[in-house]
């Protein structure tokens, strides 16, 4: 069993053991945290031994359902590596922030299952396997929202479940169709990505439908306009851990899967519809950004903010050049850290003060300096202040889209205004200004919360000051995408 | 030796981190005494000033620009952008006066902020600002400049809202940031165009200047205008000036350093830095000059009716910046920089003097509640008089030479209307400045009690700056007076063309300037020298209300965006998108499933997956829910 399989199955195995053993919530939590540290160590090992090239590395392959050619095959390239490092860094931090939040054993068990699901989704190179993990990672999330959420949690669980399962269904149909086509064309069953990309018997119309099937599933997960209406209810009713996972990891996996699968499977359509998706992304950037301005619920505001940035990430992916792709990879990381950090901080605030509208907050900076400093760093990253990785990412995406089309580039540049128009307002209202609301229950971050957020803040600044250091391992992969898969040339 | 350039930026950055850590430790763990903060706060600017001089010396010895590349910042596709520093005559000239004025303001602030709860935080932000400002001027390409450019904007935001518990301060900070960001949007578009058309792979000024000639002229026009939009925001020119008066909510040393002497001049510096671009598009230059002239006049007009001492100075800053843009617009970058230089001295002095008065009067900022301060604060009185004379353009004080030079550029280049606007503005300037001066320091029947003079830590920087405000002009003595124009020689490459005026014309222009200044002073003298405080002063009218521009912007931009936001969130999303998507998906699924069942060859496979999935799910549910 290779190292990637360890990363996938270790959390699941530990979860099963802990489930059987008569241990309490605390022991389970400590176990989950320990596992996340081990995973980080493994991920770091993978990162160190990854040779900067476009090759799939740490490749493993086993038969799964032989009669239908379904295999278990996993591997990493530069793009999955950066997402792996992101997840491996984020989870231990998140656990430290959630330390006192949830006192239930099943919460932490679910977290472990989710971690397995995420890694599986990330490494899968067989579409069937991918679909399996894609669905498997969602189930515990639904559980967390349904069991530990607040407000109208049953309805919102139902809504996100129906929404995403519907989306996945379209994708599933497309996957099966591809498998069947492969069988008709080559006479054997296979669902491996490397086999399915060779299919050439599809008509243009068929390709269109299959492409749409994948895109709908990913558009819901990301979410792209107009598939976002599950977002608000889910984010505002989820417990902190759930919303953290959805916003900073699962949404990014949507973009990741878009690049991993739709790009090689439908390169021509990917190029042909680039303009449409850039437009859709930029529209989302502005639309969600404007909607965020009047939200009085901080989680709803962050939900819109998150959707707004994901629009920009998607637009960058479709800009079909190195600047845009690199920028999107950077923004995936930057946004995951910043939005994740903000949601975790809001979770801390809600633990002390209960769930409150923005208008009932204020004067927190005075009581909680560490909290406010971290909040400010995450905010600066979201707004794209120079010296943070958010700046590098937004700059590159804007340049990339500008290369694709100067007019769209000018629209994308509006990003420098969008986030600033609501983030500073929230900072002012919720954190800074003394408003007369009673916030005497607010406590500053505890030591392990300070420690937990430190890696995130450090990465924000380090990637902003010396971005090139973080690009060495991903650049060959992105070149490969542009040169060999899309045939547009890396320096177009 | 060029590495010294990197240290000039790095040192304040390190002291920022140190001060910030000390401050956080101090408020959360154990109190650190103020003197330790003071030590770091003064040590770093002093060393940076010396480093700046060392770099200057090195430049003179070598005779060509210093260049230092620290590391590869970003290498993407064809582009390889370095974290590089350029120490040429322009940037080291800027470093010289920035570090000098900034050092004095740091010293002054140790007294001004004395015993303030946020003492450490204040200096941490100040040092971050210094680092960003120095990066801005020392950067060897527009991208690094942009990092400093946005960085100083961030510090400006943090320092305007320094007393963050008061809503008005934070609102002012937000306004400053967002208006500046509108400018930055323009700047960013300009950058993207430069990237795209500039054919420079390392994106440094050097290679950009080399290839700029190959860019089509309409593109050049676009780039020049877009970059200038950034300057409009940073340097508070029409129409993006609205943040500057509100920015006065910050502590007074902030107004002196950031909103008068250094940051707001970044726009002028940027245009001068891009002279190789602006030289090719003189019609954009004319546009810039007109924006500058209008801003100068408009701000001066508003200043004549204001009553808050810092707001008067803020409008005066905007007005003086307008003069500088007239000059850069007409290609006389050196004259503009000369004015940047002299302005840094007298405007910092004006703000610091005003700060001393404000402290003496327990944070009173309404000039009509001051009066007769001459008797209490003789040093402040004398230094403020020098600064007021300097800004009014009375010879031989510093402002006279630089302002005269700009007006003669306007006249000499044949833009008589610009010259006329400038001269009328000069009358207004000396009027509103002496109005302020007479009301605050002279007048009769002041009613305030318990006034105390400020200590020598605050007064000493005033005196040093007063020396500067008196003599800085001699560095740019016009040929007419038989002097050597040292700054003109130093910055000789920063002038598009020379304008030759006959000595007679030059003498007439100088005479007119002095007459204009004296005229303003005379009117102010008549109206305000013996101003009686018992007569209540109620300014009103459209000028006092600043032509209702703030209200107009509020309706046009703030309220309309909020309305749109509410419409999107409440109507579009809830009532339209959600319903349509839910309905559509229902239809699609119905259709999609049917097709899938027909087309899929293996029904058994599907059934297997479903059963397996449901089985796994139920096991999981049972386990978790038990």
Image (spheres, coloured by chain):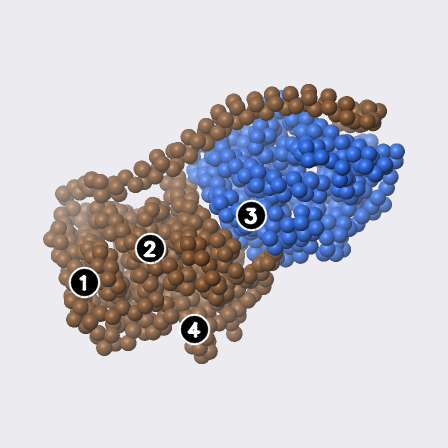
CA separation in Å, label 4 and label 3: 44 Å
Q: Identify the subunit bearing mark 3.
A: A
- Determine the chain carrying the residue at label 1: B
- The reply to whether the C-beta atoms of the residues labelled 3 and 1 are less than 8 Å apart is no
Q: Are marks 4 and 3 on the same chain?
A: no
- Dot 2: element: helix
Q: Nearer the viewer, residue B328 or A470?
A: B328
The residue sitting at 21% across, 75% down in the picture is B481
The disc label shown at residue B56, or none: 4
Which is more N-terminal, label 2 or label 4? 4
Checking the image for residue B513, the label placed there is 1
For the residues carrying marks 2 and 1, which lies nearer the camera in this image?
A: 2
Q: Which mark is residue B288?
A: 2
How many angstroms separate mark 4 from mark 1 (CA)? 34 Å
Q: Chain of mark 4?
A: B
Question: Can you tell which of label 4 and label 2 is closer to the viewer?
Answer: 2
Q: Which residue is mark 3?
A: A404
């Amino acid at each position: 069993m290779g190292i990637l399989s360890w990363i996938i199955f270790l959390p699941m195995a530990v979860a099963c053991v802990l489930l059987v053993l008569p241990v309490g919530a605390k022991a389970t939590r400590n176990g989950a945290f320990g596992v996340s540290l081990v995973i980080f160590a493994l991920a770091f090992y993978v990162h160190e031994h990854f040779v900067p090239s476009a090759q799939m590395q740490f490749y493993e392959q086993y038969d799964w359902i032989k009669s239908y050619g379904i295999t278990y095959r996993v591997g990493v390239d530069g793009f999955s590596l950066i997402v792996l490092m992101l997840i491996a860094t984020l989870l231990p931090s998140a656990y430290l922030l959630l330390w006192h939040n949830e006192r239930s054993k099943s919460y932490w068990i679910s977290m472990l299952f989710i971690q397995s699901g995420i890694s599986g989704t990330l490494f899968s190179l067989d579409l069937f396997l991918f679909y399996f993990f894609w669905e498997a990672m969602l189930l515990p999330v639904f559980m967390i929202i349904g069991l530990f959420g607040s407000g109208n949690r049953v309805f919102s669980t139902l809504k996100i479940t129906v929404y995403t399962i519907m989306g996945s269904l379209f994708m599933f149909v497309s996957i099966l169709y591809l498998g069947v086509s492969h069988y008709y064309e080559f006479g054997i069953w296979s669902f491996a990505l490397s086999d399915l990309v060779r299919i050439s018997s599809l008509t243009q119309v068929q390709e269109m439908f299959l492409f749409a099937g994948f895109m709908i599933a990913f558009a819901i997960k990301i979410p792209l306009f107009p598939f976002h209406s599950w977002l608000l209810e889910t984010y505002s009713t989820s417990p902190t851990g759930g919303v953290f996972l959805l916003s900073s990891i699962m949404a990014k996996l949507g973009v990741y899967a878009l690049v991993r699968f739709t790009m090689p499977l439908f390169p021509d359509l990917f190029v042909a519809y680039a303009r449409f998706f850039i437009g859709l992304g930029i529209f989302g950037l502005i639309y969600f950004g404007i909607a965020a301005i009047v939200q009085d619920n901080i989680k709803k505001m962050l939900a819109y903010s998150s959707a707004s940035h994901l629009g920009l990430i998607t637009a960058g992916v479709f800009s079909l050049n190195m600047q845009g792709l690199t920028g999107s990879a950077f923004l995936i990381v930057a946004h995951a850290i910043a939005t994740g950090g903000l949601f975790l901080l809001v979770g801390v605030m809600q633990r002390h003060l209960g769930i409150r509208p923005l208008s009932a907050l204020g004067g927190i900076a005075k009581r909680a300096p560490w909290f406010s400093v971290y909040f400010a760093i995450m905010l600066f990253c979201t707004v794209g202040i120079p010296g943070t990785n958010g700046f590098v990412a937004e700059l590159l995406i804007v340049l990339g889209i500008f290369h694709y089309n100067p007019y769209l580039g000018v629209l994308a540049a509006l990003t420098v205004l969008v986030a600033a128009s609501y983030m500073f307002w929230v900072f002012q209202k919720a954190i800074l200004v003394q408003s007369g609301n009673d916030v005497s229950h607010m406590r500053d971050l505890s030591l392990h919360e300070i420690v937990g957020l430190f890696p995130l803040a450090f990465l924000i600044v380090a990637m902003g000051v010396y971005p090139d250091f973080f690009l060495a391992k991903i650049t060959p992969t992105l070149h490969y995408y542009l040169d060999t898969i899309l045939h547009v040339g890396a320096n177009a | 030796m060029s590495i010294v350039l990197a240290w000039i930026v790095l040192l304040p950055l390190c002291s920022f981190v140190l001060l910030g850590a000390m401050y956080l430790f101090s408020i959360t763990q154990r109190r650190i005494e103020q003197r330790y903060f003071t030590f770091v706060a003064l040590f770093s600017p002093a060393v940076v000033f010396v480093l700046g001089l060392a770099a200057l010396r090195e430049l003179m010895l070598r005779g060509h620009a210093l260049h230092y590349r620290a590391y590869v910042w970003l290498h993407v596709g064809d582009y390889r952008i370095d974290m590089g520093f350029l120490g040429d005559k322009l940037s080291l000239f800027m470093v010289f006066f920035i570090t000098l004025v900034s050092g004095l303001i740091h010293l002054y602030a140790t007294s001004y902020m004395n015993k303030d709860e946020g003492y450490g935080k204040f200096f941490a932000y100040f040092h971050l600002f210094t680092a960003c400002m120095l990066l801005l001027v020392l950067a060897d390409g527009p991208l690094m400049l942009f990092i400093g450019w946005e960085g100083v904007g961030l510090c400006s935001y943090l320092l305007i809202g320094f007393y963050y518990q008061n809503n008005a301060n934070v609102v002012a900070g937000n306004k400053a940031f967002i208006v500046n960001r509108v400018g930055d949007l323009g700047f960013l578009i300009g950058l993207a165009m430069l990237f795209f058309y500039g054919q420079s792979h390392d994106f440094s000024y050097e290679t950009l200047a080399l290839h700029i000639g190959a860019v089509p002229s309409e593109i050049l026009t676009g780039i020049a205008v877009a970059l200038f939009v950034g300057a409009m925001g940073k340097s508070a020119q029409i129409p993006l000036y609205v943040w500057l008066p509100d920015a006065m909510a910050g502590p007074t040393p902030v107004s002196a350093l950031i909103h008068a002497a250094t940051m707001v001049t970044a726009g002028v510096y940027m245009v001068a830095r891009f002279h190789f671009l602006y030289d090719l598009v003189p019609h954009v230059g004319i546009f810039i000059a007109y924006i500058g002239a209008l801003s100068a006049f408009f701000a001066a007009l508003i200043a004549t009716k204001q009553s808050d001492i810092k707001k008067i100075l803020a409008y005066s800053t905007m007005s003086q910046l307008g003069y500088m843009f007239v000059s850069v617009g007409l290609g006389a970058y050196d004259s503009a920089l000369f004015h940047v230089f002299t302005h840094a001295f007298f405007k910092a002095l004006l703000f610091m003097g005003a700060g001393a008065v404000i402290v003496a009067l327990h944070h009173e900022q309404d000039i009509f509640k001051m009066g007769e301060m001459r008797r209490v604060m003789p040093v402040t009185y004398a230094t403020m008089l020098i600064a007021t004379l300097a800004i009014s353009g009375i010879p031989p004080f510093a402002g006279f030479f630089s302002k005269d030079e700009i007006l003669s550029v306007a006249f000499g280049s044949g833009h008589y209307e610009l010259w006329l606007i400038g001269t009328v503005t000069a009358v207004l300037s000396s009027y509103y400045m002496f109005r302020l001066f007479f009301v605050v320091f002279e007048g009769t029947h002041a009613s305030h009690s318990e006034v105390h003079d400020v200590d020598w830590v605050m007064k000493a920087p005033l005196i040093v700056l007063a020396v500067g405000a008196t003599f800085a002009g001699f560095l740019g003595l016009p040929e007419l007076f038989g002097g050597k124009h040292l700054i003109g020689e130093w910055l000789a490459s920063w002038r598009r063309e020379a304008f030759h005026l006959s000595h007679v014309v030059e003498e007439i222009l100088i005479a007119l300037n002095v007459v204009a200044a004296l005229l303003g002073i005379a009117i102010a003298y008549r109206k305000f020298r013996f101003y009686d405080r018992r007569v209540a002063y109620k300014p009103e009218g459209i000028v006092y209300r600043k032509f209702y521009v703030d209200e107009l912007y509020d309706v046009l931009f703030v309220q309309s965006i909020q309305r749109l936001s509410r419409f999107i969130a409440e109507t579009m999303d809830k009532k339209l998108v959600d319903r349509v998507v839910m309905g559509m998906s229902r239809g699609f699924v119905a259709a999609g499933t049917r097709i899938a069942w027909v087309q899929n060859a293996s029904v058994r496979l599907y059934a297997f997956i479903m059963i397996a999935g449901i089985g796994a799910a139920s096991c999981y549910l049972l386990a978790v829910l038990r």
